[in-house]
Image: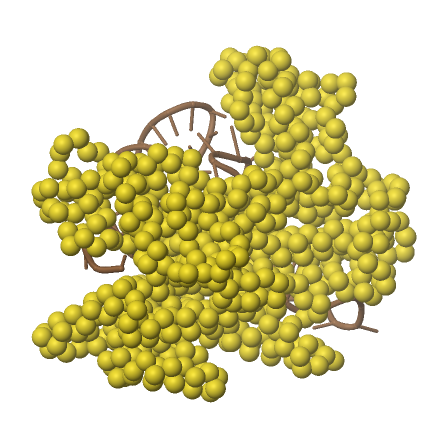
Amino acid sequence: MYLELQKRLGERIRSILAEKYNLQLENIPLEIPPDLKFGELSTPIAFELARKLRKAPKIIAQELVAALTGPDGVPGFAGFEVAGAGYINARLDRVAGAHRTAGASDVPPASGLHVLVEHTSINPNKAAHVGHLRNAILGDTFVRMLRAAGQKVDVQNYIDNTGVQVADVVVGFQHLEGLSLKDVRQLLADLQTKGQRIDFYCWDLYARTSQWYEQGSEEENAARKKLRYATLHELERGGNETSEVAELISTAVLRRHLETMLRLDIEYDFLPRESEILHLKFWEAAFEQLKKTGVLYFENEGKNKGCWVMTRPGAEVTAGDLDEDAKVIVRSNGTVTYVGKDIAYHLWKFGLLGKDFGYKPFFTYPDHECWISTEHGEEKHPQFGGAQAIYNVIDARQSDPQANVIQALRGMGHTDQADRYTHFSYEMVALTPRCAVELGYNVSEEDLSRPYIEVSGRKGFGVKADDLIDKLIVATRAEVDARQTGRDETERQRIAEQIAIGALRYFMLKFTRNSVIAFDFKDALSFEGETGPYIQYAVVRARNIFRKAGTTPDAVLAEFAKLEGVGTYLEGEAAEDIWALWLRAARRTMVLEQSITTSEPAYLAKHAFQLAQEFNNFYHRHHILTEEDPAKKTFLLATAAVALQELVLALSWLGIESPEAM
RNA sequence: GGGCGAGUAGCUCAAUUGGAUAGAGCACCGGCCUUCUAAGCCGGGGGUUUCGGGUUCAAGCCCCGACUCGCCUACCA
């Protein structure tokens, strides 16, 4: 409702400005005033025009208000006034607004583009940790938001199965543990029967291997490093025992990652793997294009002599001068860097490479299949790639390489694609020193004085995702057991899981993207105040009202549509808090649009929380079931119905379920 | 050295991207369960938005300078 009225008012002011002052303005700033006493929408446009029109803001505002209040006014608005030194405040027709909010919803703002979102992308050599959770939850929430806005979205999870990280655990299996391919296969089967997690196993082995590289004498360490790179090259080449071990391990760990994410209701459509990017020669195709377009050039001198390099974004280089700072894409030994492979992959994403993956089914969800890349795939498969817009959910530390890929696309003349390439960047999740100590890690004196400590998979330092989820469920289960004595075991467990996931997802979403999360169990395990459970609790309370009243939100809203004299409940001093709740609910599409254009799910999370807050306030102030005036009771029920609807919807966009009870 | 981000209440974070009286949660103090569930509600204290200049009708936000912190910046991947 709000968004529609905002657009309508903007249009109207624009046309008045064109007519009256012959001014063409792109955007009319319209905002929601800090207090309802200033109306429901306002604009400071008069201040902006004061200089241009050489008139006092107040005069301009008065003229605009006169034009707006004209013979027919503006549909949906009750009036306009000048306030302060020149604000124009608009007041809504509350009755019409309420009916609009209770009835049909706004048309979501879809761009109609085919969008590809990539998130999670955990190296398949260890368990997922809290940092990966932030990535996946941000990405999944953004996908839900895009889909809610009517967008067609493919979800990808990129798997670097031939990188040095996987090589390191393979070194661990083969050389630290002395396991053969057969042994590894047996180990996987044993873990399976014992119900143990292979990703947890690898977590420790990876940390041990990383240490091992530095533990020996100088000669030993050199030999170990050599072993590391020999292993890496075997992986890249493929078709040998070492690469088979890697394939086994990385696939098993990947499955575990998908299972972990499924606990949070996070699903994927396609898993492109680096092994196919290598074996299907994506890079070779990209290399030709990069040379042809002059994005890459061969360096004949300086420290990068013998390499194919690329000018960095924003670098000012005069032609012919030596650019020592250039980014190396192909090393002097002929091997390609990670950025090079990434450029090839992104050309594929936009359908510009002229090559495609093979596809085979990999993981089955209740309502769809997740596919994985392979060299020779199935004949019949869905289409991936060839997107018009992409979002890469990758932490802020990778903004440099991401900028390089965009720069390459731009340099190749794919400017539209470069413009629709969004690095959905976010800050890392770190641990508070207290949390690190709590987990039993050795924390240096220096680290103890810092506000947070970066997690490190290499050191095995961090909080594993499954451990955190387990811990959350234990905590919520204790609460549910105490409160829901009448419910059976399975039901209580189900509710506990819903609340635990709600707490976790909200926790990861309530921070804006560029704030570092200093993780602490105390905060993450909190279910009070600004948390997911707080919002879920508001939903449960609203549902209880309808259950006890023996009616449904839909029935109430149908009755409300016919109700006369709604104005008496919406106008006046006493009605302000109720009207504020209706207005908050009416902001849904506005918030969705804002969250999408800014790539900031935190806005939506905040919105859901504020809505819950206002509902709780309303809940305490107005006792519905004991209301004696039937018309007022219908109105109050309708208020609860609207709040309930909006809360459930907003939560679903955040990937948070609304429990039946808690 | 260069690039990016950050510095706001005791703590953790917001602030509709330049708008009206800088807001939430936690913590602390005080009230409210015979009511539609207290995972809740109400009230209270707590701020020179790191510092110094500038731009303008208007600055937490933009510009300049200083200070502090984090990340990135290899022919490793």
A12, above or below A519, in the image: above
Q: Is residue B60 left or right of residue A31?
A: left
Q: Which chain is yellow?
A: A
Please state the horizontal and vertical placement of residue A249, each as a whole percent of the image.
37, 74
Q: Position of residue A312 (x, y in %)?
A: 25, 41
Q: Residue at x 22, y 33 (%)?
A: A316
Q: Is residue B45 above or below residue A465?
A: above
- The brown one among the chains is B
Q: Quadrant of residue A528?
A: bottom right
> Is residue A395 at least partly visible in the picture?
yes
Q: Quadrant of residue A621?
A: bottom right
* In the image: residue A294, left or right of residue A201: left
Which residue is painted at 56% across and 27% down in the image? A28
Relative placement, left or right, of A176 versus A492 is: left
**Residue at 56% across, 25% down:** A45
The quarter of the picture where the N terminus of chain A appears is top right
Can the viewer see residue A429 in this picture?
Answer: no
Q: In x, y percent, where is residue A167? A: 28, 69
Where in the figure is residue A117, as x and y percent of width and height? 48, 51
A329 vs A251, left or right, is left
Nearest the camera: A413 or A40?
A413
Which of these two is toward me, A586 or A149? A149
